[in-house]
Amino acid sequence: MKTSNVLHFRYLLIISTFIGVVFVVIAGYYFSKDSSKNSVISINSLEGIPDIYPGLEWAPAKRQEIAFSTQTMKDKVYQDGYRIVSIGLDYYPDHFVGFYNTQFKNRGWTKIAGSKGPGGTRFGYSVITNYTYIDPYGLGGVLTDGDEQIFEYGVMSPGWSEYPGQYQAYIQYNILSE
């Protein structure tokens, strides 16, 4: 009778451990899926930035320090931002590039980057708000400060993407304030 109780206890322990593991796996999947959804959607809440391009499948946004081209510094600066990359593509996504080119031209943003090379294509736009414009001699003046929202996007060529033999689109933007 003692052996029977010990066996029942062991079976109960094994079953409860299995249920606990299944619960942890399901909860991990649910929360990781939910947080990736929120991080990708967060771009839509920024004023002036177009929605994320809907024609591609996107990985979750990653917050990191990113080297951006700027309108004011005329150079690269490192700022906190978000980078979002697409899942691998078998084709060059012209529609993705055209979508953002049109969006930023229509919004009046300034084009600050545009290049094409073996690694892919890259475009950048920015808009400056809350700035001071000084023109003491009427010769063209300068911006002295302000908040520069930067948005860069492009396509990595097959040899440069995370997916061997496939293209990969990306967008990245800086964080002005939270």
Image: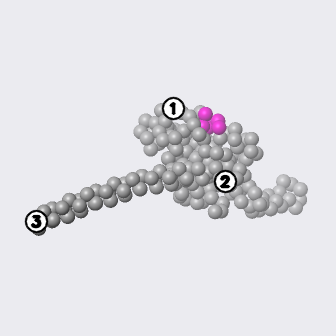
From the image, state whether disc 1 or disc 3 is nearer to you.
Answer: 3
Residue 73 appearing in the image: yes
* Residue on which disc 2 sits: 46
What is the three-letter code of the residue carrying label 1? Tyr
From the image, state whether disc 1 or disc 2 is nearer to you.
Answer: 2
What distance separates the C-alpha of mark 2 from that of mark 3? Answer: 68 Å
Q: Which of 56 and 115 is in front in this view?
A: 56
Q: What stretch is highlighted in magenta?
A: 95-99
From the image, state whether disc 2 or disc 3 is nearer to you.
Answer: 3
**Image quadrant occupied by the C terminus:** bottom right
Up the image or down, 167 lies above or below 31; here it is: above
User: At numbered mark 3, what does the secondary structure look like: helix, strand or loop?
Assistant: loop
Residue 8: percent from the left, percent from the top?
18, 61
Where residue 1 sits, quadrant-wise, is bottom left
Where residue 176 sits, quadrant-wise, is bottom right
Q: Position of 83 compared to 48: left or right? A: left
Crowding near pointer 1: few (<14 within 10 Å), some, many (20+)?
few
User: At numbered mark 1, what does the secondary structure look like: helix, strand or loop?
Assistant: loop
Color encoding of the figure: one colour
Q: Position of 149 compared to 155: left or right? A: right
What is the three-letter code of the residue carrying label 3? Met
Q: Which of 171 and 31 is in front in this view?
A: 31
* Residue on which disc 1 sits: 91
- What residue appears at the point 89 percent right and 56 percent down from the top-left corner? 138
What distance separates the C-alpha of mark 1 from that of mark 3? Answer: 69 Å
Residue 146: percent from the left, percent from the top?
74, 61
The numbered dot on residue 1 is 3
Q: Which of marks 1 and 2 is nearer the N terminus?
A: 2
Residue 48: percent from the left, percent from the top?
71, 50
User: At numbered mark 2, what does the secondary structure look like: helix, strand or loop?
Assistant: loop
